[in-house]
Image (cartoon, rainbow, N blue to C red):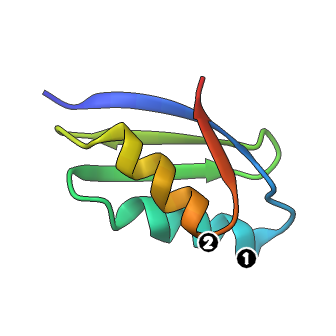
C-alpha cells in the first residue's frame, strides 16, 4: 500500500529549484510520484516502501532542507 508523505522544503526560490527537488525525490527507490509546490515550499510524495531518510538526504544533496510535516 502506498503512503503519502508531506514535506516542508526550505531554500527553493524558482522553478529550477522545484525541478531539482522533484528530480532528486523521484530518483529515490520506492517513490511513485512527487508534486513540489514553490508557493507553499512543500512537496507531496507518494511512495511504496520508500525510506524517508533517503528522501530527505536526496533533497539535502541538492542544497535544500526538507522535513516531514
Mark 1 closeness class: few <14, some 14–19, many ≥20 residues within 10 Å: few
Q: How many marks?
A: 2
Percent from the top left, x then y, of residue 23? 48, 70
For the N terminus, the quadrant is top left
Q: Residue at x 22, y 58 (%)?
A: 29
Q: Quadrant of residue 25?
A: bottom left
Q: Is residue 30 left or right of residue 13?
A: left
Q: Residue at x 34, y 67 (%)?
A: 27
* Marks 1 and 2 in Cβ contact (< 8 Å): yes
Q: Which residue is mark 1?
A: 16
Residue furthest to the left = 1
Mark 2: which secondary structure? helix
Q: Which mark is residue 66?
A: none
For the C terminus, the quadrant is top right
Mark 2 closeness class: few <14, some 14–19, many ≥20 residues within 10 Å: few
Percent from the top left, x then y, of residue 60? 59, 58
Taking depth in this image into account, of 63 and 46 the one nearest to the observer is 63
3D distance between C-alphas at marks 1 and 2: 5 Å
Taking depth in this image into account, of 25 and 56 the one nearest to the observer is 56
Q: Quadrant of residue 61?
A: bottom right
Residue furthest to the right = 13
Residue furthest to the top = 69
Percent from the top left, x then y, of residue 46? 34, 40
Q: Which residue is mark 2?
A: 19
Q: Is residue 1 left or right of residue 12?
A: left
Mark 1: which secondary structure? helix
Q: Quadrant of residue 3?
A: top left
Amino acid at each position: 500500500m502506498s503512503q503519502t508523505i508531506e514535506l516542508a522544503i526550505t531554500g527553493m526560490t524558482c522553478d529550477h529549484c522545484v525541478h531539482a527537488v522533484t528530480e532528486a525525490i523521484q530518483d529515490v527507490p520506492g517513490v511513485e510520484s512527487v508534486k513540489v509546490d514553490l508557493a507553499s515550499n512543500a512537496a507531496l510524495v507518494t511512495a511504496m516502501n520508500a525510506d524517508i531518510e533517503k528522501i530527505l538526504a536526496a533533497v539535502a544533496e541538492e542544497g535544500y532542507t526538507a522535513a516531514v510535516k
